[in-house]
Image (tube, helix red, strand yellow):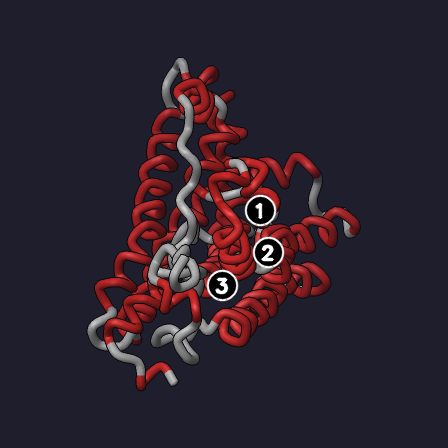
Amino acid sequence: MTASRSPTELAAAYARPPYRMPSPPARESHQLVLDVLLPWRLAGRVYGPYRMMRLTASGVTAAVGAEVLGPYAQPVVTRVAAQTLDPVVERLLMPRALLGLGIVLFLVRTVTGTWTSGDLLIELIGEDSVVMLLTGPIALLLGCLPLVLLAYPGTRRQVGRLVARPLLVGVFTAVVFVVMMRSALLPSAGVLLLWLAPFNLCVLYLVHRNSFAVRAHPLVRPLVATLLVWLTALGHVLFVDRDGTSTHGPALVALLAGPVGVTVTAVIEIVLLRRRHGVGFRGPLGPLGPLDAAGPSGLSGPSGA
């Protein structure tokens, strides 16, 4: 059990996947320039990938060469890949993002004639962006702080480091959207808006897909996703849909379909993280695994090698 682990064992468990994710590969100078100039690439660098990542021993071997890994490291890479990226969990992220963006509400209101594609763009780029600006930091605080408070004594500092990046990204998001709102009032805002509009759309999708939880505590993503979608739905009713067209009839069912669907995917993710990867709300679960015993790198070879 987790409670019987020593502080050293808990520290070692936090140093392995899915708590400690592999660092991204080093970027060349021209790639860094493109990351800044192209809005979709900058959004992906800050808010996470657009699709399921694929990490296998064969893929790593092809990238760095078999002579680098050697015969002992390749099985370890396979185990690390399996622990880092759960295919079932990753497949939940696309439907979660679409549900969080309100695709069901859009379809229902389009069929019933109460919404057009122009309404979608206006609310998605404008008013819903403001709602996400207001609800995102709240969802992050409500999702991250309990993980720190519930962590076992002696590990709260490590958990704090695991939730620090999502909180910093949330602050960055708030600053960016404030700049966007002020820039829209400038006389020469047209050119800037050509860059900000696709960036805004990418951010909205990636926030609902990854929930600010890139290289963070694995429970941040399902917790923040659930809080964000419910708070956004509430904000949509209070601040965006002032005419009340989505608070009755089929539109109300469609409005609630997003938060309910995201909550279901989040519960599935939490259960899978607990059963497959030993991730609990208070800390790592289960006995010390071979990767823990091998240390953070998990690349120790057989004795006598």
Residue annotated with mark 3: 222
Pinpoint residue 79: horizontal percent, then vertical percent.
Answer: 53, 60
Position above or below: 276 against 237? below
- Residue 249 left/right relative to 196: right
Q: Earlier in the sequence, mark 3 or mark 2?
A: 2
Q: Distance between the Cα atoms at labels 3 and 2?
A: 12 Å
Pinpoint residue 149: horizontal percent, then vertical percent.
Answer: 26, 72
Residue at the (65%, 55%) spot, across then down: 95
Kind of residue at badge 3: Pro
Viewer-proximal residue among 5 and 194: 5
Mark 1 crowdedness (10 Å alpha carbons): few <14, some 14-19, many ≥20: few
Pinpoint residue 106: horizontal percent, then vertical percent.
Answer: 68, 49
Kind of residue at badge 2: Glu
Residue at the (34%, 31%) spot, across then down: 179
Position above or below: 268 against 38? below
Q: Is residue 128 visible?
A: no
Q: Marks 2 and 1: CB-CB under 8 Å? A: yes
Q: Quadrant of residue 245?
A: bottom right
Between disc 3 and disc 1, the foreground one is: 1
Residue annotated with mark 1: 53
Pinpoint residue 104: horizontal percent, then vertical percent.
Answer: 69, 55
Residue annotated with mark 2: 90
Viewer-proximal residue among 219 and 181: 219
Between disc 3 and disc 2, the foreground one is: 2
Viewer-proximal residue among 2 and 282: 2
Mark 3 crowdedness (10 Å alpha carbons): few <14, some 14-19, many ≥20: many
SS at circle 1: loop
SS at circle 2: helix
